[in-house]
Amino acid sequence: MTVRERLLEAATEMFYAQGLRAVSADKIIERVGTTKVTFYRHFRTKDDLIVAYLERRAAQEREGIGQAVDLAGGDIGKALDLIAGGIGAVACSPGFRGCPFINAAAEYPDPDSPVRKVVDTHRGWYTSVYESLIAPLGLPDQAAVVAQLVLFRDGAMVAGYLGDPAAVAESLSRGSRALIGYPRD
């Protein structure tokens, strides 16, 4: 593994567990056992490392959601169930500390910061997934429905602190299906 990858691995673990602002570049450098010169050769600023961390998390989520949509084979209800199941499993896993993007937005409120731009891009991607998913239904006010689906997803991420994966997944699936009028088989 390259030094850059080791820095990103350490940052991923530490940022998620402790918070973006709580973890200094020095802590990451110490954890990896490298130097400041090496760190800054790979990441110009700590914010650049945070952006790389969030982009990595976004790629992982996109892969998982993409697999769920592909596996559903065009069945909207099945796609919603698979997405809900995946979110429930993640949201209730040991060490879960909330959505890394919602957490990042809380720590970086400036909409012009590079960190916030990654958050906004990822949320835009989620919006486009739901838009594509429900487009065949021809629902009136699709934008409002999509916004509600994203809100349900956000709520499931918070509920992960409080419940078990099956209950979170079931609630998310049931709410999503009810919203779009897509009953269970």
Image (cartoon, rainbow, N blue to C red):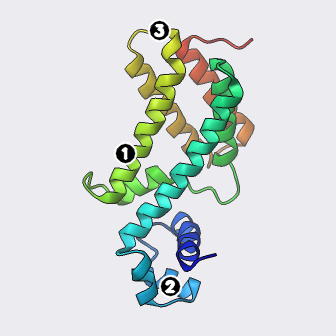
Task: From the image, tell me which residue sits under label 1.
Answer: 120
> In screen coordinates, is 80 left or right of 137?
right
Indicate the quadrant containing the N terminus: top left, top right, bottom left or bottom right. Answer: bottom right
Residue 94 on image: x %, y %: 70, 57
The amino acid pointed to by label 1 is Asp
Residue 123 on image: x %, y %: 43, 41
Dot 2 or dot 1: first in sequence order is: 2
Res. 171 visible in picture: no
The residue at 62%/56% (across/down) is 96
Relative to 89, is 140 above or below? above
Relative to 22, is 89 above or below? above
Task: From the image, tell me which residue sits under label 3.
Answer: 138
Q: Secondary structure at mark 1?
A: helix
Q: Secondary structure at mark 3?
A: loop
Indicate the quadrant containing the C terminus: top left, top right, bottom left or bottom right. Answer: top right
Residue 105 on image: x %, y %: 38, 53
Discs 3, 1 touching: Cβ within 8 Å: no
**Which of the 4 quarters of the picture holds residue 146?**
top left
> In screen coordinates, is 63 left or right of 117?
right
The amino acid pointed to by label 3 is Gly
Instruction: Work out how far the residue at label 3 is from the one at label 1, CA to CA, in angstroms.
Output: 26 Å
Task: From the image, tell me which residue sits under label 2.
Answer: 29
Q: Residues within 10 Å of mark 2 (few under 14, many from 20)?
A: many
The residue at 43%/69% (across/down) is 49
Dot 3 or dot 1: first in sequence order is: 1
The residue at 48%/36% (across/down) is 126
Discs 2, 3 touching: Cβ within 8 Å: no
Q: Residues within 10 Å of mark 1 (few under 14, many from 20)?
A: some
Relative to 24, is 156 above or below? above
Instruction: Work out how far the residue at label 2 is from the one at label 3, CA to CA, in angstroms.
Output: 52 Å
Discs 2, 1 touching: Cβ within 8 Å: no
